[in-house]
Image (tube, helix red, strand yellow):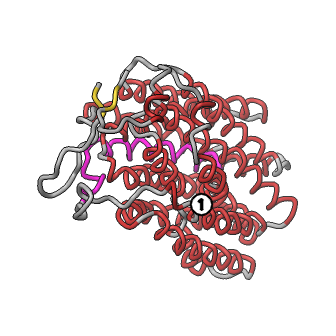
């Protein structure tokens, strides 16, 4: 059990230390939490809806999964490249200063991409619109995690919050694909992307308006601004980035391959159901992971979880029926959550507080980049070979990432927490003492 050394013990720390295994109920009763959780949930939908909405729209207008995957990939690469920069700006200038212009730009760019696709614009024009669409995706998930860090500093509830956020991410991957598929197939091929842009605008602005829970701009002991090193300089973060690239390969490969499979059997509406089953497995295992008091070191748990993920993904390309594919998808999803949760948990021990938003966005960006590469490769495989060939992408991505993780797992051992990364010498701040 940890105790916090401060001059004025907080009521929250006292309450949080009363139970060795705090649950989700206590977490959600944290004062002020719902003010950023509800708008944050709406603003997180872009990450779950954007890629699939683009794939379904562009495939409808061009008739090619390769073109659809390429357009979605450009969006994903742009998001991956700009997400860490967005996180670093949020650490430096505050979340509101980054979010407001970001959601406005994203809305305009996504609607422009929609209009171009419906007008049968050339592929290069779609790529040009896809760049700002991906680059401006609001990084709300990392920002919510940073707000929990402020609310729960020094509290054992922080590990519960980490699991809760991973479950919330997966809930968006249940709701998002189902919503995108239903809108694109039952309403209009453009409805998914239009809805995504609307949710981004409304949810993002409401989230940015919650100034009371926004982390304060990092400063050195209350006065001079600290010049922080990038989270990318931490070796363990680079290992986690590769690990999350493999997870992104699972998401991207599943999206394209499931869409191609359901179309090949004449049931395109099942795409959202199958992908939702995959995401539901992820969400359910995340709930379990958050409720367990783990004794094994997180780096060891990550290796085991990732090996299980690679093993589960190896069976996808052999599935030839809806029921078998649903069962395998559920199993793959159940293996993803432990890896995601453990990876985000390791950030707490690897990265100083002033660079954690950036670190979280590197991991989010890695998932987006892996997803972008996966939809491109899977789209080409589905176009050129038989239906189901795209399922080889999740297998290949996870095996490559597992090899890197096994070779470099020693870099995931964290240094003492609450150290300030700065150029120069600072003063000691209250720290958590084990």
**Near-viewer residue (310 or 199):** 199
Q: Is residue 227 above or below residue 287?
A: below
How far from the left and from the top, in percent, is residue 31? 57, 43
In-image side of 255 versus 261 (left or right): left
Q: Quadrant of residue 187?
A: bottom right
Q: Which residue lies furthest to the top in this view?
A: 295
At 69% from the left and 36% from the top, the residue drawn is: 280
Task: Based on the picture, tell me whether residue 41 belongs to the magenta stretch.
Answer: no
Residue highlighted by disc 1: 207
**Type of secondary structure dominating the magenta stretch:** helix
Q: In which quarter of the image is residue 276?
A: top right
Q: Is residue 6 above or below residue 117?
A: above
At 77% from the left and 55% from the top, the residue drawn is: 181
Q: Residue furthest front?
A: 8
Q: What's drawn in magenta, residue-wise? A: 228-256
In-image side of 40 versus 430 (left or right): right
At 78% from the left and 36% from the top, the residue drawn is: 322
Q: In this view, does 35 lie above or below 69?
A: above
């Amino acid at each position: 059990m940890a105790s916090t050394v401060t001059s004025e013990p907080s009521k929250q720390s006292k309450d949080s230390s009363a139970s060795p295994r705090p649950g989700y109920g206590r977490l959600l009763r944290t004062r002020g939490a719902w003010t950023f959780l509800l708008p944050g949930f709406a603003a997180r939908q872009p990450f779950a809806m954007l890629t699939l909405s683009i794939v379904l729209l562009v495939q409808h207008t061009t008739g090619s999964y390769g073109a659809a995957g390429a357009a979605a990939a450009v969006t994903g690469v742009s998001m991956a490249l700009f997400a860490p920069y967005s996180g670093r700006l949020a650490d430096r200038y505050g979340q509101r200063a980054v979010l407001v212009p970001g959601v406005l730009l994203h809305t305009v760019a996504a609607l422009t991409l929609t209009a171009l696709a419906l007008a049968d614009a050339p592929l290069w024009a779609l790529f040009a619109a896809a760049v700002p669409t991906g680059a401006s995706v609001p990084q709300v998930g990392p920002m919510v995690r940073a707000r929990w860090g402020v609310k729960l500093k020094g509290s054992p509830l922080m590990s519960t919050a980490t699991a809760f956020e991973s479950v919330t991410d997966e809930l968006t991957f249940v709701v998002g694909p189902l919503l995108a598929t239903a809108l694109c197939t039952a309403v209009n091929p453009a409805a998914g992307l239009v809805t995504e842009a609307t949710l981004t605008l409304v949810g993002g602005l409401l989230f940015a308006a919650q100034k009371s829970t926004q982390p304060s701009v990092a400063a050195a002991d209350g006065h001079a601004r600290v010049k922080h090193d990038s989270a990318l300089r931490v070796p363990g973060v680079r290992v986690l980035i590769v690990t999350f690239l493999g997870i992104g390969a699972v998401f991207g490969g599943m999206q394209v391959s499931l869409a191609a499979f359901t179309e090949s059997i004449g049931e395109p509406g099942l795409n959202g159901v199958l992908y939702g089953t995959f995401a539901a497995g992820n969400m359910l295992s995340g709930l379990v992971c958050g409720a367990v008091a783990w004794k094994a070191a997180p780096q060891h748990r990550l290796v085991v979880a990732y090996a299980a993920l690679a093993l589960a993904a190896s069976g996808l390309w052999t599935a030839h029926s809806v029921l078998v594919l649903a069962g395998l998808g559920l199993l793959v999803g159940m293996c993803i959550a432990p890896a995601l949760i453990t990876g985000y948990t390791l950030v707490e021990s690897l990265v100083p507080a002033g660079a954690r938003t950036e670190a979280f966005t590197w991991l989010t960006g890695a998932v987006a980049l892996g997803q972008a590469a996966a939809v491109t490769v899977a789209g080409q495989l589905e176009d050129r070979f038989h239906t189901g060939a795209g399922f080889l992408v999740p297998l290949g991505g996870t095996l490559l990432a597992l090899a890197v993780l096994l070779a470099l797992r020693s870099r995931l051992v964290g240094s003492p927490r609450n150290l300030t990364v700065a150029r120069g010498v600072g003063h000691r701040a209250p720290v958590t003492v084990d």
